[in-house]
Image (tube, rainbow, N blue to C red):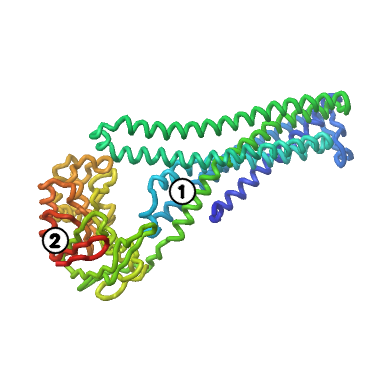
Amino acid sequence: MLFRSPAIKWQAVSLGVLMILSAVTEGIGLVMLVPLLEAVGSGGTSGTLLPTPFADFDYALSLGSMLALFVGLIAIRSLLVVARTSSAIRFESTLANGLRLRAWQAMLHCDWRELSGMRRSESASLLISSLDRVGYGLSQLIAAISALVTLGMLSLAGFLIAPQVVAVLVGLGIAVLAAYYGLRRRAARQGEALIRSQATVYASLSEGMAALRAVKAHKAESQAYRILESGLARLAEGHRAFVRDKALGTFALHVGGALTLSVLAWLAVTKWGLGLALFLPLIALFVRALPLLATVQEAWQSWAHARPALVEAEQLIARLEACREPADESGEILRFAATLTLANLNVRFAGQDVAAVDDVSLTIPRGSITAIVGPSGAGKSTLADVLAGLLAPDSGELLLDGIALDPARRRAWRGAVAYVEQDPVLLTASVRGNLMWAAPAATEAQLWQALDDAQAADFVRALPAGLDTLLGDGGRRLSGGERQRLMLARALLRDPQLLILDEATSALDAANEAAIVAALRRLRGQITMLLICHRGSLLELADQVVRLDAGRLVDET
């Protein structure tokens, strides 16, 4: 899934080439230490201490030439390291952000039935926090691969100097990485636990911030504090456990490396009789290889810790893409001339014993106002979602002038429907920005007309900057009634065939409810309206009232 994009594949190849080139130059530099040391010992000319096939190669150079070549090689490698680092950061960013964007796109195009059943706090936590960990894990994986490539080149260089010694070291390195398998498994389990802890913390914060008024009204500040404190404590403990394991692993590796180096040095001097020109490059190789081996282990462990977040993200994307809505490629603007009809409609949600909507048939004449009433849980919002084209029924049909909407045309129908929810959804933007979110091409005159139709023009003119007044987070600068009228104006900008108001006045005072009712009364006959309500002035507007109970139509007047 990660490497579908040709751009990502090209970045991966480029990064791999840079890793190999930087590793090769480092290996050559270590091999060059042998003739350099020999040249210093012999008074300025290199000899032939390297084993075959290099022993027969005449590479006699002056000390100055050897040093110049060595400096040039170091400069080239440094440039390659800079390019490799830049390429790695770009690759990591492309992968992590590409994954995040793909998940968001899958969510945007997913069927509403699937979306409405998801825990949004968990999905948001995954898209924000967990995918940040994926980005870090990818950077660690890149670091591990880079270190492995460099270790491979250093091993080749070492084989040219002392093959028996390097063979032992390579075997020990492989054994060390194998010995750390259990630690990596534990890191993976810690990563899975971290996903759950992050989701809990994110849910506590998002729910707590949404309920601040209720928290203070009920004097529940201490309880809300303890809930978040507990989640943060679990999150911190999980992070500490992972960092502690990494530190212990690094400690054991460094101590073991120091012991190994001491034993090899003693053997090289007392048993194998290696000369200084061979022994010192081997020491340099080992000193360079040990932190690289530590990098491989730590990065591998970090990747094991981050990989559960990647698996979770891929599972979310697969789940969302499996429920992808059919594409609406026609660009058709659907309208109806006479009737909008529900025929024998049935909707049942997974895990529920009874149907949310059970065999409902209903005809809505064009230009009429229909009110749907009933107790909570009666199926009113589900019925509205079907009429809005958001929800596909399990059986039955939604028909425009007697023509059933197939899945693709149902999505096209959504472009002709405007939905005003009970809780106003406003952007942290200006009045103009909020209105044009629904109609990006709207003119100034159209904006003011929509505001006037929604009984909102007067209070917008009274704002300090009019249309360009910033409304703050969620439109907090406005009262509840003003926010709801602005929502109505935004809906009217879409020039809808069907306007749905879902409990749009239930939380408003009498004055604001009267303003909404006045606006709708002026629009009577121009727009087909569906009102979901329990009681109040909105019912007086209705041409027909439909009563639902337990998903069934029990009365129609």
Give the image quarter of residue 4. bottom right
Label 1, secondary structure: give it: helix
Q: On the rendered image, what quadrant is the C terminus found in?
A: bottom left
The answer to whether residue 492 is seen in the rendering is: no
Q: Is residue 257 left or right of residue 318?
A: right
Instruction: In the displayed orientation, state which residue is furthest to the bottom.
Output: 402
Q: On the rendered image, what quadrant is the N terminus found in?
A: bottom right
Residue on which the image places disc 1: 100
Residue on which the image places disc 2: 523
Q: Residue at x 18, y 66 (%)?
A: 555
Residue 234: x and y in percent read 46, 34
> Which of 443/274 is in front?
274
Distance, label 2 to label 1, CA atoms, is 42 Å
Residue 216: x and y in percent read 25, 33
Label 2, secondary structure: give it: helix
Q: Amino acid at mark 2?
A: Leu
